[in-house]
Every structure is written in C-alpha cells, then in structure tokens.
Amino acid sequence: MNRKLFASLIVLLVTLSMVLTACQPAAPETPAEQPAAEQPAAEEPASTDEVTLRWRTRPDNQAEIDVYSAISEELDAEMDGVSLVYEPGGSESSSYQDVLKTEIGAGTAPDVFWIPGTDVADFATRGLIMELSDVAGDFDTTAFYAGPMFHLTYNPETGANDALWGLPRDVSTFALYLNMDLINEAGAADPRELAKNGEWTWEAFLDVAQKVRALGSDIYGYGANAWWGPYATWLNAAGGGFFTPDRDACALDTEESIAGLDFERSLYVDYDVAVPYGEDSEPPFLAGKVAMFQNGRWATPGVRANADFAWDVVGLPEGPNGPGNWLFWGAYVVNANTEHPEEAWALAQKLTEASTQAKISALGTNIPSRVSQEALDAFLTFTPPDNNQAFLDGIAAESNPTAEGPLWVGNWPEFDAIMGAKVNAVMTGELSVDEFKATICSEANKVFQQ
C-alpha cells in the first residue's frame, strides 16, 4: 500500500474515534469523585467498652455480704454500659474508714462506697469524696429522712444546706435480740410483755440479766460490742450524751452522762451479767449463750441464718430519760478521684431507690431510708423477728432518738478515739467513773475547732 494512503487512513480512524467518544454520554462519577458535602456520613461502629464501677459496703456478717452481692448482680444487669464489682469491706487490719482513706490516697479506692454518718464531715473536709450537686442537678432530697439529709447537704464553707455529699443507704436503730429459750429456762419475765405494759425499765432489764446469768458460768444475760453506739444508749437514756446541743463541745462529764455510764459499768464490774467488755458478743449469742444481745437491724440476717433457738427482739429498756436510742444511718458517697462521676452518681441513686431498699429490707438488713409509710408498713412484714415494731418504735419521733451525725466543727475520729479508750478503761475496771469525769472533757475538747 502507498505509504501516503496508509497514513491518511490512520488519521481518518483516529478522527472518527474522537468524534464517537465526544458523542457518548459522560460516565457517572464514582462516590470518591462526589463533592465532600454530598457524601453520606459514615456510621461509627457502636462502642463495646463498658465502664467498670467498684463499690463497697462494710457488712456485719456473711449473710449481709450475700445480700449486697445479690443486689450488685441485679443492678449490673439493669445498668447499660456499666459493669459492677461489689467489694465487702472489713476491719481486719485497721478500721474500715482508715483503709478507704489510704486507698483514696493511693488511687486504689472504689468509685462508690458506704461510710457511716459520723464520718461524712471528715471525708468531705479532707476532699476525699465528691460534692455531687453539679452532677445531681435538681435531685429531690426530701424523699429521705431529714436528719441524715441535713448533714449530707451541709456546706461547711457557706454554712448553708446547698451541697450534696451522698445519699443515705438506710436507717436503723438498736434493739435487744432475745434468746427466749434462755429467758424461759431462767424463769425471767418476758421483756416483750414488760415493754407492752410500760414496765421495761433498767431495773427490769437487770433482773432478767441476773436470772439468766445464774444458769451457768458461760451463760450471760447481756452482750454488746465495744464501740460508741451501744454505750451511748445508756448515756442517752439517762438524759446525757456526747456533745453539747450545738455539737461544738464535749458533754461526757455531765451528771446525766455519768449516770448512764455508771449503770452500764455496773453490768460488767458490779453484777457480772455481761459478756466481758471488748469481746465480740455476736458469736456467743448465736451459740445460745447470751439472753439479750444489743445490736441494730443489720444483725438480723445473721440471726436468721444461724440462731438455733427461739428468738425475737424488744426495744431498749427505759432509763431516767426514756429508751435512749439512736437513729443510725450511713451514706453512699462517690470517690473524689473517680474517672466516671456520672456513672458513679447513677449507681448511688440505684442503690438508694425504693425498689432496691425494699429488697434489702426484705432480706432483713436495714430499714428503708426513704420517708414513706408504705415502706414502713412493708417493713413490718419482713419477718422474723416477729416484733419488727420494736425497730420502728426506736426511730419514731416520739421516742426522740439521737440522730447519728458528723462533727463539722471538730474531728469525730479523734473524739471517738479519746472517748473509746476512756470508756473501755471504765468498763474493764481500770478507771473509776470519778476519774473518767475529771479528765474526759479536758482531753476530748482538744478536737474541736475553736
């Protein structure tokens, strides 16, 4: 073929190809070529990470550990995105509160933990627990007993009740757990009947204790553990107490306080009707060796599980000023260093909801801290013991119970340490009541901020 002709054909074919390509419709743009604004938003994968919250109480016995373990499992199932780890605390090495303080300093403390009402001020002023008002918003605190909430909302910087340090887990009061088999064997009067008739006095109490003590050298009429709660009831029943009305000075040396202390001392030193002071009275009671064991509602699960004798409860005997009981309470608070404040606050709410409190009360551990007649009526059905009314009578307004509370103008742990050592010496006969009276307040007043 002629070279010129061949070249002309090539040019013609290229030209035709370009014309045909120009006439074709444009190919659609790929998604990558679309303007960024028109691209559909990419869906982020759902997070599978759960927040783990550790929480702690100080159980009185294994039965109570089981109660809170079951509650933790139920709440774990309810709380989306949160995994709960329950840790029962104890006092084997040092006090429960001191362990918490050490762990907070070391960064190993739980996110949420229970502390006694007496310790709220100490933990708050040390910066160990979170002030929750910002996280809580307009949470209704009036659903709980006013006594605990006064301290849980007190702001030491302003003197007003505009803070929130936690929520009360429960309330409780003392009763005497009775071994009716021992009381009947001794031929003593039934304390429940004496109480119904208005005859349950210190003198009647001592009579029952002495008759039971006569049954044997290892049988005791009365038992109580060596901490401030039990011995304070005798002071309260005589019209005395720890502090002046403003809670800013010691009142342990008043005539009324000394009268109560002296009566309790007589149970150990003069009449020898009580389990030796300083020994744990619960094991001998559960073993059937103690007729009247003084403790709070928190002891009920252990008695239910272990008492192999007929038992019930009765209110405390009346002294010169009445029964002298306490309104105990403790609170769930949030670790100031938690990495999950919102979730921790949600857990504190869950732990104090009416439904949760009902489950705990049904198992016998505590009285609900929410002010509700329905809750109190339900509490009466949580038997044994049959005489649950004794606990409610103890916290009733007409019984004028002393509300447990912290010292916002002093140091409760230091006050407790000074007082406890002196009371222990009185109960064991190492210190006379007169010696106690002469020195106690000069020492105890050192803990108050003047």
Image: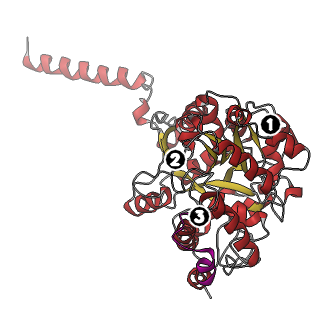
The N terminus - image quarter: top left
Residue 244 found in image quarter: bottom right
Q: Which residue is mark 3?
A: 119
Q: Nearer the viewer, mark 2 or mark 1?
A: 1
Q: Nearer the viewer, residue 244 or 319?
A: 319
Q: How many residues crowd around disc 3 within 10 Å: few (fewer than 14), some, or many (20 or more)?
A: some
What range of the chain is rendered magenta? 427-438
Whether residue 185 sits left or right of residue 430 in the image: it is: right
Between the C-alphas of marks 2 and 1, the distance is 30 Å
Give the distance between the C-alpha atoms of the residues marked 3 and 2, in whole angstroms.
15 Å
Q: Nearer the viewer, residue 91 or 68?
A: 91
Marks 3/1 in contact by CB < 8 Å: the verdict is no
Residue 334 vs 49, above or below: the answer is below
Q: Position of residue 32 (x, y in %)?
A: 40, 34
The amino acid on which the numbered mark 1 sits, given as a three-letter code, is Asn
* Quadrant of the image occupied by residue 66: top right
Q: In the image, residue 150 lies at what x, y percent?
A: 75, 65
In this rendering, the label closer to the viewer, 3 or 2: 3
Mark 3 vs mark 2: which is more N-terminal?
Answer: 2
Q: Amino acid at mark 3?
A: Asp
